[in-house]
Every structure is written in C-alpha cells, then in structure tokens.
C-alpha cells in the first residue's frame, strides 16, 4: 500500500514544490493544499492546476485571528485523510503551526526550513524569530535546503531528523524563439525581491566604478519588488541608460525570456540560506556572480562554473564585472559548458526524488 502524504505549500513557495510533488505522486497518495494569500498577488502557475491540488484562499490577512478557523478547517480535512506524512512548506505566522499541532500528530510532520534565523530587513523580524524557535523546538522532522544552513541549525537545535537537498531548479517554461543573448553587450541581471541583506547598493556602486566604455559594452537590469526603492533611485539615476530598474513583481510568464537574454545573474548578498533566483538561473543555464559566502560557495566553483567575490567588497565586484565584460568572448562559453555539467550531476530530478523517498521512509 502506498504511503499517504498531506502536502501543504504556501503560495510564495509554490515554485519550490511544483517540480517535486507531481513526480512523487507516482509513488505516494498525495493530497496537496496550496495556501493562497487573500490579496491574490501570487498566482498559482497553470501547470500546478493539473496536479489535483486544493487551492485554499485565505479569507483574511495572515495575522488576522479569524484565520484560525481557516487553518482549523484544513487541519480537519487532513485528519480525515489520515496521512502517514504531513509535509509543510509554509511559514504562516502566527497561527498555522499552533492550530496544526492541536489537530495533528507532530511526529508525522516535516517542516521545510528555508531559514534558521530571521535576517535584517524582514518585516516583523522579532516575532518571526520567536515563531521559528517554536517550530524548530517542538518539531522533529526537518527539510533543510543547504549544507551550511543544516550546520547552523544543528548548532542551535540538536537531535532532529533532517533531510538535506538543494532547492529544485525553478522552471518557468521555455523562452520565446526571439529571446536570444545579445552579442554586442554583456547583460547583467539582479532579480527578485530587493531586501536589505541582498545589497543592491553594493552592485550599483561597483557598476558605477566601471569606465564609460565598459558600461557602454554592458547593461544592468534590476527587476523585482522593492519597497524601499528611494534608497537606490539616486545611484540608478546617475547610471542613466546603463541600468533598467523595474521595482515591481515580475510576472511568471516574463521570466523565461528575461533569463534567456542575460549573461549573468549577480547575487551580492551579505547573507543567505539559499537563493531562489540562483536556481532559476541554473534552470536556464545562466552562470552567477555571487558573494563568497556559504550559501553560494557550496553551489559555485569560482572561475569554473561561476564567479565569487568577497562579501560587501565594492572594489572586488567592480574588478570582476570588468573581467567578465572584457573577456566575454574568451571565457563565457567555457563557463556555461562547465555549469551544464554541474547542473546535470548535482541537481538532477531523479537524484532529488530518491532523497525525498529515502527520508520519507524514516517517518
């Protein structure tokens, strides 16, 4: 008899689970619940609708106490399903976990831990850290998405049953035929929600240090939601036409063409657990330029399939940008070929699926 899994995914993590859950349905009986915010800002990809999922739209904002009834209804539906495993890829603060714990056995729960600590710039940071501590302290089964985050977690919380895999590659579909890499310029991309720890300011300062000639031979696109755009507007204005700044959420259907028309994703973060944009870039075979911190260095071999530079070092990043612009015709093709080999050996779906299956046998 196949094991039964109740799978809960928050809409903001749908791109994490969508490559995995449909494939696991071949071996497990899965009821999939996707929690969609009441504002509907995040749409559920059409491909997900073919997976017999239950889209559960929140009737209120997440911190509204009336959401307790919403979570209770889902918990009762899961209880009636009587699953062997309850996989939770959601961090709905502050009511979801207390409600699930009231109705369902914790020993069957697996929490997908994308972060172990809250970072500067997070909304409600102190409350989030307390909520994380509650989840980690009172639940045994964890899924962690990087080795360095696992080490950090184990130093804080011992005696847990842990699955460690990288994030799945994030596939938003095929680019259009006309979406091609330009041959006359090096296209640099900063993509995703702009948060304080992602240090867009470092990238803008480094790009400003390039000569006029090098900026004429390149272009920087900054694409993604930004609540504090005023912090960057002066630097971007000084760079003129060298930079495109779109501080809005990028529609999913635009993502394939964006990644197909840029050479490098630049990740100047000062700290990270793991990066979603990084896995989008790898899905489309795009090398990254990233800070030399554990969240990136376990995925990037400097000078082989990508580039690393010292964290918060404007000069180091400027020198690296100069290198990739000047040496595009010499280095880029080899870099991409090496990256394709890296992706094939480390991020293949069959490898990830076997790890999930092995872990589920321990619950």
Image: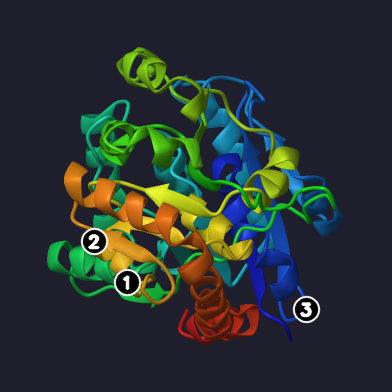
Residue drawn at (23%, 46%) of the image: 270
Name the N-terminal-most of marks 1 and 3: 3
Residue 88 location, x and y as percent?
Answer: 51, 56
Q: Is residue 351 above or below residue 209?
A: below
Instruction: Name the one closer to the observer, 85 or 218.
Output: 218
Task: Name the residue at the front extreme.
Answer: 213
Q: Which mark is residue 3?
A: none
Q: Are marks 3 and 2 in contact (CB under 8 Å)?
A: no
Instruction: Name the one closer to the observer, 351 or 111.
Output: 351
- Looking at the image, residue 259 sits to the left or right of residue 124; the answer is right
Q: Are marks 2 and 1 in contact (CB under 8 Å)?
A: yes
Q: Which mark is residue 292?
A: 2
Local secondary structure at mark 1 = loop
User: How far apart are the alpha carbons under marks 1 and 3?
Assistant: 38 Å
Badge 3 is on which residue?
26
Q: Nearer the viewer, mark 2 or mark 1?
A: 1
Residue drawn at (44%, 24%) of the image: 226
Name the N-terminal-most of marks 3 and 2: 3
Q: Is residue 178 above or below residue 339?
A: above
Local secondary structure at mark 3 = loop
Residue drawn at (77%, 52%) of the image: 175
User: How far apart are the alpha carbons under marks 3 and 2?
Assistant: 39 Å
Name the N-terminal-most of marks 2 and 1: 2
- Looking at the image, residue 87 sits to the left or right of residue 28; the answer is left
Residue 351 location, x and y as percent?
Answer: 57, 85
- Looking at the image, residue 95 sits to the left or right of residue 295; the answer is right
- Looking at the image, residue 133 sits to the left or right of residue 106; the answer is left
Local secondary structure at mark 2 = loop
Q: Nearer the viewer, mark 1 or mark 3?
A: 1
Q: Which mark is residue 302?
A: 1
Q: Quadrant of residue 142?
A: bottom left
């Amino acid at each position: 008899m196949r094991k039964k899994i109740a799978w809960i995914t928050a809409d903001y993590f749908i791109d994490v689970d969508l490559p995995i859950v449909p494939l696991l349905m071949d071996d497990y009986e899965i009821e999939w619940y996707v929690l969609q915010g009441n504002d509907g800002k995040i749409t559920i990809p059409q491909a997900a609708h073919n997976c017999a999922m239950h889209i559960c739209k929140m009737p209120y904002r997440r911190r509204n106490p009336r959401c307790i009834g919403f979570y209770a209804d889902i918990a009762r539906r899961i209880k009636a399903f009587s699953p062997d495993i309850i996989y939770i890829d959601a961090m709905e603060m502050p009511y979801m976990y207390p409600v699930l714990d009231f109705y369902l056995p914790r020993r069957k729960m697996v929490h997908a831990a994308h972060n172990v600590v809250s970072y500067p710039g997070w909304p409600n940071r102190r409350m989030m850290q307390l909520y994380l501590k509650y989840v980690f302290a009172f639940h045994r089964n964890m899924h962690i998405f990087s080795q360095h985050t696992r080490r950090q977690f184990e130093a804080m919380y011992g005696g847990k049953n842990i699955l460690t895999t990288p994030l799945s590659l994030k596939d938003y579909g095929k680019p259009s035929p006309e979406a091609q890499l330009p041959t006359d310029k090096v296209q640099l991309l900063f993509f995703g929600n702009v948060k304080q720890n992602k240090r867009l300011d470092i990238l803008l300062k480094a790009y400003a240090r390039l000569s006029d000639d090098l900026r004429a031979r390149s272009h920087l696109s900054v694409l993604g939601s930004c609540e504090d755009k005023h912090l960057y507007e002066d630097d971007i204005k000084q760079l003129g036409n060298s930079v495109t700044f779109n501080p809005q959420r990028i529609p999913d259907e635009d993502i394939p063409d964006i990644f197909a028309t840029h050479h490098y994703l630049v990740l100047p973060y000062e700290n990270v657990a793991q990066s979603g944009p990084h896995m989008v870039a790898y899905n489309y075979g795009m090398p990254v330029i990233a800070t030399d911190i554990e969240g990136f260095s376990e995925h990037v071999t400097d000078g082989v399939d990508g580039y690393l530079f010292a964290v918060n070092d404007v000069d180091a990043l400027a020198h690296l940008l100069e290198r990739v612009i000047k040496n595009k015709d010499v280095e880029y093709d080899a870099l991409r070929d090496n990256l394709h080999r890296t992706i094939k050996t480390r991020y293949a779906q069959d490898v990830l699926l076997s790890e999930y299956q092995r872990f589920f046998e321990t619950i």
